[in-house]
Image: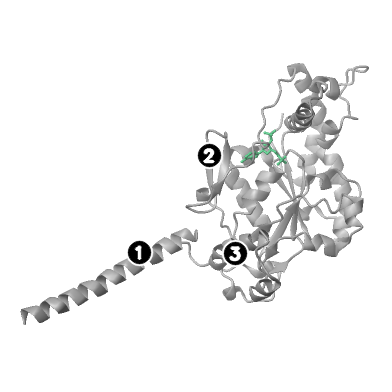
């Protein structure tokens, strides 16, 4: 009798133990898939697509990211692509600029959203005549694989300043959403200069000082022929775009704030793109060594941007900085007026 009771007790304990272990494994798997116990929220079908919302909850998209990563690495066959219903979609939104505004950080941070897939490389389709001549199918083939309910985003900062680009993008999709990330114009110009300077130094070449390039030595006025200066006159470029797209199709991202306080900026972009809010503080952590926010995809995978992002700028003569700030001031005012976004630039 006692023996029978012991066997019965042991069986019960075994069942309970298996249940406990099973639940634990289930929980670990859930956390591992970065679900973070959020309520199911389907991707709103505002971007079109052939499947019902219920079929593609965000949670599933998040889980399938690993799979997409494999496809991106080229570990896929045509059969697998077909089986998983993957497509290469033209972008529904483009980060058109501005160079050194924080375009890479913005793209990478938006890619944290389960409904967003980034084109990793700058494609330079619309600003490069040779690429453009290859046609829209060439461009589409450059896009990453994604699920139809996801949106693809690409960034090529040269688009913002290249004359032909607005018309070309309009011809592809007149209702596309356009993101412009800007920084205080003088800081952006110095950042632009720093990138070129680093390139020269890498090739053991000497280069002019920023002051010499930014100020015309004959007139002592700001040198508007210098590209780094011209690029920072945001309103001039935007006016060309407005010949094709209404202002509602643009969203201005404050690149200076994206550095210090990325989440609210990203939340504004989620709203603009009609995406359910999914990027959270969990996804962004400040890395003191880097001096920047880095990205956390899940408990295992996180990354900071490459060292080429966040260079130390050279010291610039304060009188030149003042002169440039004064020069940009009226253009900035116009930019605020057109875009409806006032930034606290001097
Ligand atoms: P600096 O190198 O002048 O600091 P882009 O990607 O358009 O070239 O922009 C580069 C800028 O992105 C960098 O300019 C850096 O300040 C900014 N940036 C914004 N968020 C960043 C982040 N989380 N990590 C690194 N750089 C970031």
Decide if residue 170 is on the left or right side of residue 195: right
User: Could you tell me how far apart the alpha carbons at marks 3 and 2 are, in whole angstroms?
Assistant: 28 Å
Q: Is 308 located above or below residue 79 in the figure? A: above
User: Could you tell me how far apart the alpha carbons at marks 3 and 1 are, in whole angstroms?
Assistant: 24 Å
Q: Mark 3 sits on what residue? A: 67
Identify the residue at horizontal 24%, vertical 73% (top origin). 14
Quadrant position of residue 340? top right
Q: Identify the disc placed on residue 24.
A: 1
Position of the C terminus, as image quadrant, is top right
Q: Callout 2: 10 Å neighbours few (<14), some, many (20+)?
A: some
Q: Callout 1: 10 Å neighbours few (<14), some, many (20+)?
A: few
Q: Secondary structure at mark 2?
A: strand
Q: Is 21 located above or below residue 290 in the figure? A: below
Query: Within the displayed image, which quadrant is ligand 1 positioned in?
Result: top right
User: Could you tell me how far apart the alpha carbons at marks 1 and 2 are, in whole angstroms?
Assistant: 31 Å
Q: Mark 2 sits on what residue? A: 286
């Amino acid at each position: 009798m006692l023996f029978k009771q012991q066997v019965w007790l042991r069986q019960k304990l075994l069942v309970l133990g298996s249940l406990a272990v099973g639940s634990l494994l289930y929980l670990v798997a859930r956390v591992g898939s970065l679900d973070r116990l959020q309520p199911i929220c389907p991707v709103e079908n505002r971007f079109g697509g052939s499947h019902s919302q219920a079929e593609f909850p965000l949670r599933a998209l998040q889980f399938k990211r690993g799979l997409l990563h494999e496809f991106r690495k080229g570990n896929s066959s045509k059969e697998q692509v077909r089986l998983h219903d993957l497509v290469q979609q033209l972008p529904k939104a483009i980060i058109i600029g501005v160079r050194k505004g924080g375009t890479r950080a913005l793209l990478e941070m938006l890619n944290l959203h389960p409904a967003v897939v980034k084109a990793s490389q700058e494609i330079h389709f619309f600003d490069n005549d040779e690429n453009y001549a290859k046609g829209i199918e060439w461009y589409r083939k450059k896009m990453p694989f994604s699920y139809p309910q996801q949106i693809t985003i690409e960034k090529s900062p040269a688009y913002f300043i290249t004359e032909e680009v607005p018309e070309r993008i309009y011809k592809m999709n007149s209702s596309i959403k356009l993101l412009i990330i800007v920084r205080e114009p003088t800081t952006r110009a110095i950042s632009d200069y720093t990138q070129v300077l680093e390139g020269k130094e890498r090739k053991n070449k000497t280069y002019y000082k920023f002051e010499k390039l930014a100020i015309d030595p004959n007139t002592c006025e700001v040198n508007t022929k210098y590209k780094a200066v011209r690029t920072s006159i945001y309103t001039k470029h935007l006016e060309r775009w407005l010949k094709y797209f209404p202002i509602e199709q643009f969203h201005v991202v404050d690149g200076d704030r994206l550095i210090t306080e990325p989440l609210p900026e990203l939340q504004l972009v989620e709203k603009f793109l009609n995406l359910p809010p999914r990027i959270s503080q969990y996804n962004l952590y400040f890395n003191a060594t880097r001096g920047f926010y880095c990205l956390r995809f899940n408990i295992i995978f996180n990354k900071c941007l490459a060292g080429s992002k966040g260079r130390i700028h050279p010291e610039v003569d304060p009188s030149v900085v003042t002169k440039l700030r004064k020069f940009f001031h009226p253009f900035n005012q116009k930019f605020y007026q057109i875009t409806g976004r006032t930034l606290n630039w001097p």
